[in-house]
Image (cartoon, rainbow, N blue to C red):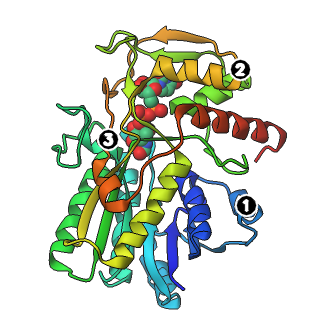
Amino acid sequence: MAKILVTGGSGFIGSHTVVELHNAGYDVILVDNFSNSNPKILDQLERITGKKPEFVELDLCDEAKVNAFVAANTDITAVIHFAAFKAVGESVQKPLEYYRNNFYSLLNLLFAFNKKIDFVFSSSCTVYGQPEKLPVTEAAPVQKAESPYGNTKQIAEEMLSEACAVSPELFVTSLRYFNPVGAHETALIGELPIGVPQNLVPFITQSAIGKRGPITVYGNDYNTPDGSAIRDYIHVVDLAKAHVAAVKRLEAKAADTNYEIFNLGTGKGSSVLEIINAFETSTGAKLNYVIGPRREGDIEQVYGDVTKAATLLHWKAELGINEMMRSAWAWENYLKDNPF
Ligand code: WQD
């Protein structure tokens, strides 16, 4: 039975991926240090899957502990590496903490597996910056990162590609996420932002439930149909399923190279105002918002060309904006009655 190591497995995308790996019949072992997640998620995963996930609390920046963990778990057949700091704004304030955490953890894993492992890397569409051409393909040039967070993703991709070039038994797939949103249909797991949400959808749900004031739309003077910025929002469950597809492709050794990159989006762009409208119409909840200035570092519009994932991963996003909004709202209501 294939056993998948999921680092950051109690996080937003990690926890949803654990559910889909379980559904696909994989054995899973999670590691996390709860620096940006909540241990209660493990109990929630048991409620969803009917099985308590195998878990080890581990700081991946501790080389000796990572080596000991890997030596004690020789049955791991693949790694899905989510564990990283990921807040764009925070990374500008704490660049060295971001470089240390995101690179030490990645390098410790690669060395502990002796550069011989199937490895799925959690990357981001931020590597594209503001693409010249839309929808953006995987062949588009990587542009100078707008933040240390984005830079950690760009540099990590380069490190992995260079390592694969000289390590024939290291097989890596970098998955470039667009904007993951929504929650599991059971409303037992979802996004758990710490403090004031930086991302749009958790701010929307917290504003709608009364935890926050009105939403500020960061700019309505962009060169877009309604003036607000456009992103490719993807349901976190669709995103999780793409990770299972990526593991299967690595297992099959179906690629003619040992380093691949895939865009994971819907291929459709939605503006901030469209998201606000979709939330109101799909949930019936009323939102208050104000128009404010553009946010430093934001790009105008990005959405992905997702042909490659459809062709080679045999995967495409199936859930639409309304289900993204409905599930995010159900999760926010669950949290209101069951605070973590
Ligand atoms: C979406 C849109 C904002 C909040 C980030 C990371 C990216 C990835 C996804 C990790 C933008 C607007 C937001 C608000 C607003 N994360 N907005 N009012 O910035 O596209 O991407 O999350 O991989 O790396 O950069 O996501 O949700 O912050 O913003 O108007 O209160 O909503 O300006 O246009 P973003 P976001």
Dot 1, how many residues are within 10 Å of its Cα: few (below 14), some (14-19), or many (20+)?
Answer: some
Q: Judging from the image, what secondary structure is the residue with disc 3 in?
A: helix
Q: Position of residue 154 (x, y in %)?
A: 26, 51
Label 1 to label 3, Cα distance in Å? Answer: 32 Å
| Furthest residue in direction right, as rendered | 337
Mark 1, residue position: 48
The residues tagged by marks 3 and 2 sit, at their Cα atoms, a distance apart of 31 Å
Is the distance from the Cβ of mark 3 to the nearest ligand 1 atom less than 8 Å? yes
Residue 285 image label: 2
Q: Give the label on residue 128, or none.
A: none
Which amino acid type is marked by label 3?
A: Thr
Q: Residue at x 56, y 18 (%)?
A: 277
Q: Amino acid at mark 1?
A: Ile
Query: Residue placed at 44% from the left, 83% from the top?
Result: 67
Residue 289's spot in the image, x, y percent?
58, 12
**Secondary structure beneath disc 2?**
loop
Q: Is residue 83 left or right of residue 170?
A: right
Q: Is residue 263 left or right of residue 53?
A: left
Q: Which residue is mark 3?
A: 126
Does residue 33 show up?
Answer: no
Please tell me which of labels 1 and 2 falls first in the chain.
1
CA separation, marks 1 and 2? 27 Å
Asked where in the image residue 148 lies, by quadrant, the reply is top left
Q: Counting other residues with Cα less than 10 Å from the Cα at mark 3, is it few (<14), some (14-19), or many (20 or more)?
A: many
